[in-house]
Structures are given as structure tokens and as C-alpha cells.
Image (cartoon, rainbow, N blue to C red):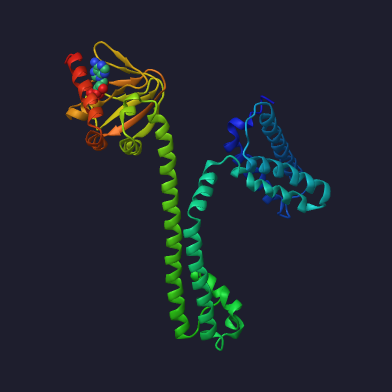
């Protein structure tokens, strides 16, 4: 089992296996794939199914032995991905058997952080989305009603009832415009123009609500993560709650692998760094190491002079960076922290001989 650690690579492996499986299902629906080629594709489907059985077993074992709590949705997807093709194998005859493997469409959803994010955005924005959907429904019905009244005598076969006119309204409001139903009268064409413009407005509203929802959700996640990181820097423990919220919003997290250069001597510096975890080495004539809770890069930020030394990651290091504009904000909201940083910069300047 250890050779098949699905949990470690599940997101990309799921997407890859599902893509191969679905392409195979699609290929099997074409009538000219017969004989040996068909057999090979069916064996491929069985192999993917077997891989999904292993994945399900691993999920269940991890759940039981290591107490790793699986997401209910993930387990449901794993179970369906195995059971539905198996049931089709036993109970369905003929070429439709392989169609049931299309349930693997759900597999990439499993473990995908994007879909969880989408779910949260849809839940949070549900009221606004329902509001715009109601407007869509009202405009749709109004358009179908108006088109029915205007066009029913001219084209009774296409606009002879509201349900018939509804198809034209959907195609026009969504600005798809198949062109299978076209208003013939002048009034009908004016109506079509108005419906198309309303459609563009409604879709723009939907897009705007979703874009704002995504932006806010990503910001909220960043805020929660930064909040946890800020707790590791003792300097910030002096901050009051209002200033802490401001600084958490301003800080940008960054991870640098061991050996990576964070800033180079002589560069201009518009940001300083706080070490959340790990160590950095400052290449002064007498090299210095700074560890968790320390900060660096403050000298260039305060004086506007070039960086006094190259700083690189001695171990993998997790940092929070603060830009100069946000440092001004920190100076006014929490002068005592800004004073500590300025004082440290002065001491380090004195300790660093000019080269
Ligand atoms: P800055 O000059 O912006 O970029 C290099 C950083 O290395 C510098 O800010 C300080 O934060 C840090 N640094 C420079 N000299 C010393 C020193 N003697 N001790 C500790 N840190 C230093």
C-alpha cells in the first residue's frame, strides 16, 4: 500500500486519472472503435477503477487507524467512483456499461481547495445571487410575454404561446442568439435589443458579485493565516487590538528556501521582514544570524539608503514583510514599536563597519 500513497498526490493524480478515464469513456461511444482497440480501452477503464479502489481503501484505513478525519464529501465521491461502475458491470449489458464511469467527473472535485472556496463564496453571496437571479427571471418572463403579444400573429409557430416565446427570451437574454427565432416586426426587434442589453447587465452583476465574493474570501483566508503568523513575533504582542488588525492586513507572508537570497547589499529596499520561523544570515564583515521573532531590512526602509548587507536564508525561513507605506501606518498607530525598530537600526548601523 505504501507504494500507492494517494493521499500525498491525490489532487493531481485524481485529475489525471479522471481525465484519462473520461477520454476513454468518450472514445468508447464512437462506433468505429471495435475489436482489440475497444478491449484495450476497457482494460484501461478497469485499471483506473482498480486505482480508485486502492484510493478508497487508503482513505478508509487512514480514517480508522490514524484518526485522519476525511471530508464526508470526499469519502462519498470515493465510494460512488467505485460502486457505480461496479454496479453497471453487474447489472447493465452492452456498450452503455462504460458510460457509468462518467461518475469520475466528480473525482477532481475531491480535495480541491478551489471548489471549497467556491462553495463558501456561493453560500456567503447567496442572497445577492438569488436577488440577481430573481431579476433574471422577471426580465425573462416579461420578455417572453412582450414577444408573445408582439409576434404571435406574425409567427404563431414560434411565438404562439408564452412557453414557445420563452425559448427566444432565454437565447436573447443570455446573448447567445442562435438565430432560429427572429422577431419580424419593428417593435419585436426593438424588444430584442432591450432584452440583449438587459442580459449583458444581469451577467455583469453576477460576475461582479462572484468576483467580489472571491476577493473577500481570499482576503479573509490571508487574514486568518497572517493572524496566526503574527502571533509568533513577540514585538507585535505590544500592539493593541486595533493596531494588530491593521498590521495583520498589511503584512505579506513569504517562505524562502534554505540558501535563498532575501535582499542584496546595495539594492534599494522598500520593505522590512519579520522572521516567523527559521534563521537568516546577514553577510556583514562579522556575519550575524537572526532567528525567530527577529526582524531585518529596517535600515534601508527607515533611512532610504541602499541595503547595508546581503541577507540569505540559513534554513527554510517563513517571513512576514512590511512595506514602507505600511511602516508609516505602524509608526502612527504604535509609536513604541516603531521606536524599537528605529533604535535597533541605529545600533546595527553602529555595529556594521562601512566597507
Ligand atoms: P538593510 O540595510 O535594509 O538590509 C540588510 C539588513 O541586514 C539591514 O537592513 C539590517 O536589518 C540587517 N543588519 C545589518 N547589519 C546588521 C548587524 N550588525 N546585526 C544584525 N543585523 C544587521
Viewed as shown, does residue 52 lie left or right of 92?
A: left
The percent position of residue 234, horizontal first and vertical second, equals: 34, 24
**Front-most of 99 and 246?**
246
Q: Residue furthest bottom?
A: 153
| Vertical arrangement, residue 83 with respect to residue 304, above or below | below
The number of numbered badges drawn on the structure is 0
Q: Residue 204 is drawn in which quadrant?
A: bottom left
Q: Quadrant of the N terminus?
A: top right
Q: Residue at x 54, y 70 (%)?
A: 170
Q: What is the quadrant of residue 237 in the picture?
A: top left
Question: Viewed as shown, does residue 18 lie left or right of 273?
Answer: right
Answer above or below: position of 147 versus 38: below
In the displayed structure image, the side of residue 112 where residue 20 appears, left or right: right
Q: Point out the image quarter for the C terminus.
A: top left
The answer to whether residue 307 shows anywhere in this view is: no
Residue 254 figure quarter: top left
- Image point (23%, 21%), residue name: 344
Q: Is residue 160 above or below residue 315?
A: below
Ligand 1 is found in which quarter of the picture? Answer: top left
Residue 218 rendering spot, x and y as whole percentages: 43, 43
**Outermost residue, front direction?**
240
- Percent position of residue 153, x then y: 56, 89
Q: Is residue 285 visible?
A: yes
The x and y percentages for residue 313 are: 36, 21
Q: Is residue 326 left or right of residue 112?
A: left
Amino acid at each position: 500500500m505504501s507504494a500507492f500513497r494517494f493521499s500525498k498526490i491525490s489532487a493531481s493524480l485524481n485529475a489525471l486519472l479522471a481525465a484519462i478515464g473520461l477520454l476513454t469513456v468518450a472514445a468508447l461511444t464512437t462506433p468505429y472503435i471495435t475489436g482489440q482497440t475497444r478491449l484495450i480501452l476497457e482494460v484501461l477503464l478497469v485499471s483506473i477503477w482498480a486505482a480508485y479502489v486502492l484510493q478508497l481503501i487508503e482513505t478508509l484505513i487512514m480514517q480508522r487507524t490514524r484518526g485522519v478525519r476525511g471530508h464526508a464529501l470526499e469519502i462519498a465521491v470515493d465510494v460512488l467512483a467505485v460502486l457505480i461502475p461496479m454496479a453497471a458491470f453487474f447489472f447493465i449489458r452492452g456498450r452503455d456499461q462504460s458510460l457509468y464511469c462518467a461518475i469520475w467527473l466528480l473525482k477532481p472535485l475531491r480535495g480541491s481547495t478551489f471548489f471549497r472556496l467556491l462553495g463558501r463564496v456561493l453560500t456567503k453571496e447567496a442572497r445577492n445571487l438569488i436577488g440577481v437571479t430573481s431579476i433574471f427571471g422577471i426580465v425573462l418572463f416579461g420578455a417572453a410575454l412582450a414577444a408573445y403579444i408582439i409576434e404571435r400573429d406574425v409567427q404563431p409557430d414560434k411565438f404562439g404561446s408564452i412557453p414557445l416565446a420563452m425559448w427566444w427570451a432565454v437565447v436573447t437574454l443570455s446573448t447567445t442568439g442562435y438565430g432560429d427565432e427572429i422577431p419580424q416586426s419593428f417593435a419585436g426587434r426593438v424588444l430584442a435589443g432591450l432584452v440583449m442589453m438587459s442580459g449583458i447587465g444581469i451577467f455583469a452583476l453576477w460576475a461582479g458579485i462572484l468576483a467580489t465574493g472571491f476577493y473577500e474570501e481570499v482576503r479573509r483566508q490571508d487574514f486568518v493565516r497572517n493572524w496566526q503568523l503574527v502571533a509568533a513575533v513577540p514585538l507585535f504582542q505590544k500592539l493593541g487590538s486595533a493596531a494588530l488588525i491593521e498590521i495583520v492586513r498589511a503584512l505579506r507572508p513569504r517562505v524562502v528556501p534554505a540558501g535563498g537570497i532575501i535582499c542584496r547589499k546595495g539594492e534599494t529596499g522598500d520593505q522590512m521582514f519579520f522572521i516567523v520561523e527559521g534563521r537568516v544570515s546577514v553577510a556583514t564583515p562579522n556575519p550575524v544570524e537572526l532567528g525567530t521573532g527577529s526582524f531585518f531590512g529596517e535600515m534601508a526602509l527607515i533611512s532610504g539608503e541602499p541595503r547595508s548587507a546581503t541577507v540569505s536564508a540559513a534554513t527554510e525561513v517563513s517571513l512576514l514583510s512590511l512595506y514602507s507605506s505600511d511602516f508609516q501606518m505602524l509608526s502612527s498607530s504604535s509609536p513604541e514599536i516603531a521606536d524599537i525598530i528605529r533604535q535597533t537600526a541605529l545600533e546595527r548601523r553602529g555595529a556594521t563597519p562601512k566597507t
